Image (cartoon, rainbow, N blue to C red):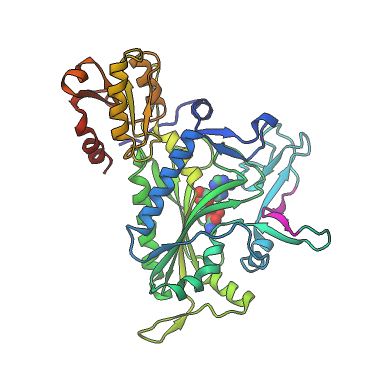
Amino acid sequence: MAGKIASPGLMEKIVSLCKRRGFVYPNSEIYGGFQGFYDYGPLGVEMKNNLKRLWWRWMTVEHKNIVGIDGTIITHPKVWDASGHIKSFTDPLAECKGCHHRFKADDLQTQKCPECGGELSEPRNFNILVPTQIGVIEGEKTKAYLRGEACQTIYLDFKNVLDTSRLKIPFGICQIGKAFRNELTPGNFLYRMIEFEQWDLEWFVKPSEMDKWYEYWKQERMNWFQGLFTHPENLGFFEHKKLAHYAKKAFDIEYQKSPFDGKELEGIHWRADWDLSRHAKYSGKDLNYVDQETGEKYLPWIVETSGGPDRMFLFLLVDAYSQEKDRVVLKLNPKISPYKVAVFPLLANKPELVKMASRVFDLLKPMFHTAWDDRGNIGKRYFSQDEIGTPWCVTIDFQTLKDQTVTVRDRDTMKQERLRFEALPQLFCDKLK
Ligand code: GAP
């Protein structure tokens, strides 16, 4: 099946919908905004939390041998020396000698300025770690960094997790948390921000089993994404040819129908023993793993899966956005939709309908995130819920008062069925499985 083709102006429509319906707002908007920073609004935070809950559950409940941590954003400054970020976490920047626009040299397709065709300067490297200072007394402040990649705290806690759990290799430590990068060209909405979130799995293996586990996680992660996107055929792998010195392979999982240049959703990284060996060297601590059965002692190798809930959020909206005449529908997987159900009394000025609808709302609310709408006519209410991706709408009308049945309308097919309201919890549970 051919993938969905991104329609012209799609990004503008999505950015506008996000603002209008409370998914995402520009940060500090009353001060004119702050480039590279965004806030999630009431619907956005629900949707993003759904994504993070799904990821966390899948990692820690549905896989054996994976535990989670929640590390700090600021760590000992030596961490970034050891990790190599102070020396080489850089992006090359080229400036146009004519119009003085700046470009990330890696993104340039030609030697000329894409804005005015002018001559570009030689690219210069800039470190993209975000520095900060800890302490209050001038002269005694310590320079530290906001973490440039969230995974470093997992390596720092590796020995603690090992000592306080019964994990045996192969095992994984996962985490969801903020990371910060002074991106040279923040842009494309949530795609490249300065403050963003990452979800990482660091999977520790015996070096001789690295190939097997690398392939395993590459496929597992693809399966997970495919199960959640509206058009899974739009996802694919990209193989990096330029590899880090410790990597034998590097693949990205991409959203291949992106309406702009960037496509990367997640990286599957072959980190080998780079991180643990560097932290062992810089800290002077023994980070070896000892196999209790064979007595073998070694530094485990690492397969990393490192992605971002913000990019997934953005590409899910791109993938789910659909316009049918004047009806805009977010055909999101119901597990991801901010609301699962919306409940409507047919008429807001009939107390008996409102009372019955409140009963239905109270039945559903503890189990499913449920919206209430009693404004305007039913058609407008359906359109309003379609636009935010609510999969099912339940209407309480005069028939309900006679036989306790309600209509359930499906977002994607627009079909309606009538059933007793007590059957709703089971119906939605089955649909959400
Ligand atoms: N620990 C490995 C690591 O950080 P990365 O490829 O630099 O690898 C992993 O980042 C993921 O983090 C990316 O695939 C993307 O989803 C997300 N990410 C990276 N930079 C980002 C940014 N500036 N804004 C939003 N998400 C970003």
Q: Is residue 187 above or below residue 144?
A: above
One can see residue 126 in this view: yes
Q: Give the quarter of the figure containing the C terminus.
A: top left
For image coordinates 38% across by 30% down, the residue present is: 389
Task: Specify the principal SS of the magenta part.
Answer: strand
- Residue 144 lies left or right of residue 334; in this view the side is right
Is residue 367 part of the magenta span, yes or no? Answer: no
One can see residue 392 in this view: no
**Residue 350: percent from left, percent from top:** 31, 13
**Residue 146: percent from left, percent from top:** 64, 55
Residue 325, by quadrant, is: top left
- Residue 194 lies left or right of residue 341; in this view the side is right
**Residue 62: percent from left, percent from top:** 32, 57
Please name whichever residue, 330 or 269, is drawn nearer the observer in this view of the structure. Answer: 330
**Magenta stretch in the rendered image:** 122-135
Q: Which residue is farthest right?
A: 139
- Residue 401 lies left or right of residue 219; in this view the side is left
Residue 103, by quadrant, is: top right
Please name whichever residue, 128 or 329, is drawn nearer the observer in this view of the structure. Answer: 329
For image coordinates 56% across by 47% down, the residue present is: 196
Q: Give the quarter of the figure containing the N terminus.
A: top left
Please name whichever residue, 342 or 300, is drawn nearer the observer in this view of the structure. Answer: 342
Q: Is residue 153 above or below residue 383?
A: below
**Residue 259: percent from left, percent from top:** 49, 34
